[in-house]
Image: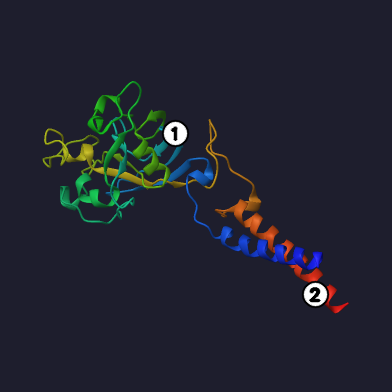
Amino acid sequence: MRKTRLAAIAASVALVGLPLAAGPASADDHGGELTAELSQLNDSGASGTAWAKVDGTNVEISLETKGLLDGAPHAQHIHLGGQGVCPANDQEGSGFEGALQTSDAADQYGAVAVSLTKEPGKTGADAALDVPNFPAGASYTYSRTIEVSEEMAKQIANGEGVVVVHGVDHDGSGKYDGDTKSDLDPELPSEATDPAACGELNAAQMSMPHGGVETGGADTSGIEYPVALTFGALALGLGGIGLFAARRRATN
């Protein structure tokens, strides 16, 4: 009787292990860590990677970028409130020769929520165009820990944040110019605020240690839920052993 009961328990554990292997990932499952691959918009040629870690109401965020306009500042933000996605690079906009302006994709990536300025620059939405405090150059590395509201922290941790880097040299002049005005500030040329790169912050598959990106082991490469899958496999193994024991007892 005891062996039969153990077999039933093991079989139940096996069944519990199955949904765990297919459960959805969240930032909480990965220690509050998120990552985003930045892809070009407006054929800017820009790319990069963003990492973020949410701890309470603090957001630690780092960016590595390349392919941007050299010698020019690049506004960069976390957007919230839209669909949490980036627009396609070939999406038509209302700006210079069909260029995508910031507001053209607001329904997709949302509005500016956090301004990723250099210290001691302000970080709220009101600092969205605080040009002197944004990083500049064709490529740069940025890192800062920013305190946000509880609601924003929750949204970012849930994978609703989108990182957008701005500033595109549409006419190849080597500077922000042109007759088309910015949809965010009519005193600026559109090139200064048009989106250049975008990436969706999703639950990271690997850790973001200080000073670099952890590569992780080859045995879990490409697997989002290695812990859940391991537990599920263990449970299935226990269930198989229990059922085998019960069947052997029944035949003896």
Q: Quadrant of the C terminus?
A: bottom right
What's the mark number on residue 56? 1
The reply, left or right, for residue 104 in relation to residue 225 is: left
Residue furthest to the front: 1
Q: Quadrant of residue 56?
A: top left
Q: Quadrant of residue 4?
A: bottom right
Amino acid type at circle 1 is Gly
Q: Where residue 251 appears, x then y in whole percent?
A: 85, 79
Please state which of residues 122 and 151 is positioned toward the viewer in this rendering. 151
Colour mode of the rendering: rainbow
Q: Quadrant of the N terminus?
A: bottom right
Q: Earlier in the sequence, mark 1 or mark 2?
A: 1
Q: Where residue 234 appears, x then y in whole percent?
A: 70, 58
State the residue at coordinates (47%, 45%). Answer: 27
The reply, left or right, for residue 52 in relation to residue 148 is: right
Disc 1 is placed on an element classified as: loop
Q: CA distance from mark 1 to mark 2?
A: 51 Å
Please state which of residues 81 and 47 is positioned toward the viewer in this rendering. 81
Q: Where residue 99 appears, x then y in whole percent?
A: 20, 50
The reply, left or right, for residue 209 in relation to residue 63 is: right
Q: Quadrant of residue 116?
A: top left
Disc 2 is placed on an element classified as: helix
Where is mark 2, residue-wise?
Answer: 247
In this picture, is 236 found above or below 198?
Answer: below
